[in-house]
Image (cartoon, rainbow, N blue to C red):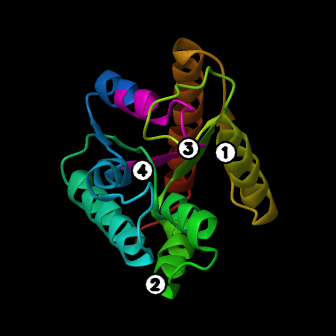
Amino acid sequence: MIKKIVFLGAPSTGKSTLSETLAEQFNSISVAEYGREYWIEHQVDRRLTPEQLLHIAQVQNQWEDEAEQKAKGYLFCDTNAFTTWHFACHYHTTPLPELTKLAEDSWQRYDLVVLCDNDIPYDDTWERSGDANRSEFQQFLNQYLITHGIPFVKISGDIESRVAQMRIALDQLSSQTEQSMSTLSFC
């Protein structure tokens, strides 16, 4: 049984690095952020259309589904449809209804939601929207998860600290699974 873990956080909070590091350490797979690749190739004046954002969320889910077939133990997902929905809200105010539905349904796809803290230095690369947006996005994500009762783990510190925190979270996740399985009875 594969456990799916999604990493959330504002831009430049270490999601990709952590996802890739854990996939390597657990000999499994990290699902990259399709939106980043797509944005670099297709953006016009640093924007994408609502239809393009829907496409990103759909492909992200497809990549996860395909990777799950090859994963071993854990599948580490760099982002999810909710993140794409959040960008759509930020840039277009009202996302397409299909994207909103994907975002709402996304929480059922994961066994563990991880919020990467913005306590690491901001990597100011050309494709990012600035440190001010990072703080705003981070605050929104944190509040959304709390307000909507979505269980999550918040990790912080350097990569070694984050990996150590994730190992504890994954051990707890595995223990919960074993406990719930031990209460099952078969006829």
Circle 3 residue: 129
The region drawn magenta spans 1-20
Asked whether 10 falls inside the magenta stretch, the response is: yes
Q: Are marks 1 and 3 in contact (CB under 8 Å)?
A: yes
Residue 167 image offset from top left, x and y in percent: 52, 25
Q: Amino acid at mark 4?
A: Lys
Earlier in the chain: of badge 4 and badge 1, it is 4
Please report contact status of discs 4 and 3: CB closer than 8 Å, yes or no: no
Mark pair 4, 1: CA separation:
28 Å
Q: Residue at x 32, y 44 (%)?
A: 32
Amino acid at dot 2? Glu
Q: Residues within 10 Å of mark 4 (few under 14, many from 20)?
A: some
Mark 1: amino acid: Asn
* Horizontal and vertical percent position of residue 135: 72, 40
Looking at the rendered image, the quarter that the C terminus falls into is bottom left
Looking at the image, which residue is at 55% across and 78% down? 95
Which residue is disc 4 drawn over?
4
Q: Which residue is mark 2?
A: 98
Q: Amino acid at mark 3?
A: Ser
- The numbered dot on residue 133 is 1
| CA–CA distance in space, label 1 to label 2 | 25 Å
153, 173: nearer the viewer: 153
- Residue closer to the observer: 118 or 106: 118
Work out whether mark 4 precedes mark 3 in sequence or the reverse, and give the earlier one. Answer: 4
Tag 4's secondary structure? strand
When the figure is inspected, residue 116 is found, relative to residue 184, above or below; the finding is above
- Single out the residue that lies furthest toward the bottom: 97
Q: Earlier in the sequence, mark 4 or mark 2?
A: 4
Q: Is residue 68 above or below residue 97?
A: above
Earlier residue among tags 1 and 2: 2
Q: Secondary structure at mark 2?
A: helix
Q: Residues within 10 Å of mark 1 (few under 14, many from 20)?
A: some
